[in-house]
């Protein structure tokens, strides 16, 4: 269990503390930590201090903006790959801060998970505060990937 005081630290301080702990760990300890993360249900992983720190750090690095639409605030972080799951702190390039709408698009495009908003299309776009032109730009960009 992580003490509440941990969250009183700034994002950079928490991330540097995590890196320091990792550097002081033995290879066996790192392996056990990574294995314990990989065994977790994904929803439980998202609630860990480990993930919350990494998520906050990745979002902060991009000044809180979605790297896909460049206009909405980043509220989520997308894994480009799960190859380094449990070692995300050492592979930040695998992670990208995105808004909810762009995250759903990316999940549909790369993970094969159905994006809920596709059924409601334009209504979801409007409720997300995006102009139709922005929606088209995002769709075209993802179509080229």
Image (tube, helix red, strand yellow):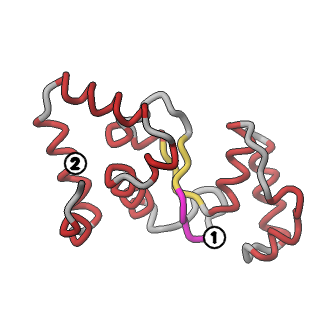
Name the side, left or right, on which 28 lies relative to 53: left
Instruction: Please state which of the two labelled residues, at mark 2 or mark 1, is closer to the viewer.
Output: 2
- Up the image or down, 116 lies above or below 89; here it is below
Which residue is tagged 2? 18
Q: Identify the residue at horizontal 45%, vertical 48% (top origin).
A: 44
Task: State the image quarter where residue 137 is shown.
Answer: bottom right
Q: Identify the residue at horizontal 20%, vertical 63% (top origin).
A: 3
Q: Which element type, helix, strand or loop, lies under badge 1? A: loop
Q: Where is residue 83 shown, x and y percent of the image?
A: 48, 28
Q: Where is residue 63 shown, x and y percent of the image?
A: 44, 67
Name the side, left or right, on which 92 lies relative to 145: left
Disc 2, disc 1: CB below 8 Å? no
Residue 84 counted in the magenta span: no
Name the side, left or right, on which 63 lies relative to 139: left
Which residue is tagged 1? 71
Q: Where is residue 94 shown, x and y percent of the image?
A: 48, 39
Q: Identify the residue at horizontal 88%, vertical 64% (top origin).
A: 120
Q: How crowded is mark 1: few (under 14 residues within 10 Å), some or many (20 or more)?
A: few
Q: How crowded is mark 2: few (under 14 residues within 10 Å), some or many (20 or more)?
A: some
Disc with the residue nearer the chain's start (2 vs 1): 2
Q: Identify the residue at horizontal 70%, vertical 61% (top origin).
A: 101
Residue range (magenta)? 72-76
Quadrant where the image shows the C terminus: top right
User: Chief secondary structure of the magenta span?
Assistant: loop
Q: Residue 139 carries which label?
A: none
Q: Which element type, helix, strand or loop, lies under badge 2? A: helix
C-alpha gap between disc 2 and disc 1: 30 Å
């Amino acid at each position: 269990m992580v003490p509440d005081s941990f969250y009183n630290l700034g994002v950079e301080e928490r991330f540097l503390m995590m890196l320091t702990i990792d550097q002081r760990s033995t290879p066996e300890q790192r392996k056990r930590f990574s294995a314990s993360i990989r065994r977790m249900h994904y929803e439980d992983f998202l609630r860990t201090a480990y993930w919350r720190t990494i998520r906050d750090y990745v979002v902060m690095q991009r000044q809180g903006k979605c790297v896909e639409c460049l206009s909405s605030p980043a509220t989520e972080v997308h894994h480009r790959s799960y190859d380094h799951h449990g070692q995300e702190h050492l592979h930040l390039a695998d992670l990208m801060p995105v808004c909810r709408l762009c995250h759903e698009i990316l999940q549909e495009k790369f993970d094969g998970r159905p994006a809920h908003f596709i059924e409601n299309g334009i209504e979801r776009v409007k409720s997300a505060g995006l102009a139709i032109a922005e929606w088209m730009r995002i769709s075209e960009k993802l179509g080229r990937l």
